[in-house]
Image (cartoon, grey):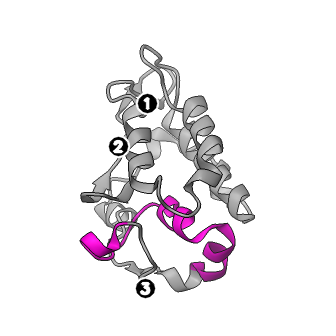
Amino acid sequence: MVIAGPQGRQRITFPVQHAEAEGELLLSDHLLPKQGWRSLKTAYGGSPFFAFFEDELQALWSAYLPKKGEHTKTLHAWCKASIHWVCATCEWAIPAAADATPAMGLVSHDLRFKKALSGEGWTFHRYAQVFEQQHGFIPGCAILDALFVLGPQELSHRLDDLVTPPRT
């Protein structure tokens, strides 16, 4: 997850390990989600809408990310819950693909897909960011960046103006 933090572009990562028996990617407690939460709070604690969503989002992190010694939380469950939360918050329809369980044995190794997922080829249009005066506009941030600054109604209203997907 890319965020625009006080030191500029920052990545919050969730280490995973492959669970052979279940064919799932389990979230590792190696770098506890608490550290990621602190980074998120530091980056957006002063934004206009963070306090409004803080309790809900912290509950989501607690429910779907592992605690020390816990090895049962899956990357798929975290992603699905995150998508559902953002869609509910912004009153968007939940995309059908959000509920589909990926088949781990069928994962493509085509690097063109990786480039699209990393934001390569996308155009991200400027909106105000918390630390923009210090670092300029940081494109390609997680949707939380725009949600915490713009709020759900403005984000929904401006979504088509904020990002342009690559031409196929």
Q: Is residue 165 left or right of residue 96?
A: left
Front: mark 2 or 1:
2
Circles 2 and 1 in contact, beta carbons < 8 Å: no
Q: Nearer the viewer, residue 131 or 58?
A: 131
At 52% from the left and 27% from the top, the residue drawn is 73
Q: Is residue 8 left or right of residue 41?
A: left
Q: Earlier in the sequence, mark 2 or mark 1?
A: 2
Q: Residue 93: within the magenta?
A: no
Q: Earlier in the sequence, mark 2 or mark 3?
A: 2
Residue 145 pos. (x, y %): 47, 63
Question: Mark 1: which secondary structure?
Answer: strand
- In which quadrant will I find the C terminus? bottom left
Q: Which residues are magenta?
A: 131-159
Q: Earlier in the sequence, mark 3 or mark 1?
A: 1
Q: Nearer the viewer, residue 160 or 157?
A: 157
Quarter of image, res 55 = top right
Amino acid identity at mark 3: Arg
* Res. 83 visible in picture: no
Question: Dot 1 surroundings within 10 Å: few (below 14), some, or many (20 or more)?
Answer: many
Numbered label attached to residue 13: 2
Q: Residue 145: within the magenta?
A: yes
Residue 93 pos. (x, y %): 74, 64
Q: Is residue 63 left or right of residue 137?
A: right
Q: Is residue 141 left or right of residue 11?
A: right
Residue 17 pos. (x, y %): 36, 28
* Majority SS type along the magenta span: helix
Name the residue that disc number 1 marks: 27
Name the residue that disc number 3 marks: 167
Q: Is the residue 132 above or below the residue 125 in the image?
A: above
At 67% from the left and 51% from the top, the residue drawn is 84
Measure how far apart labels 2 and 3 are at the Cα level.
28 Å
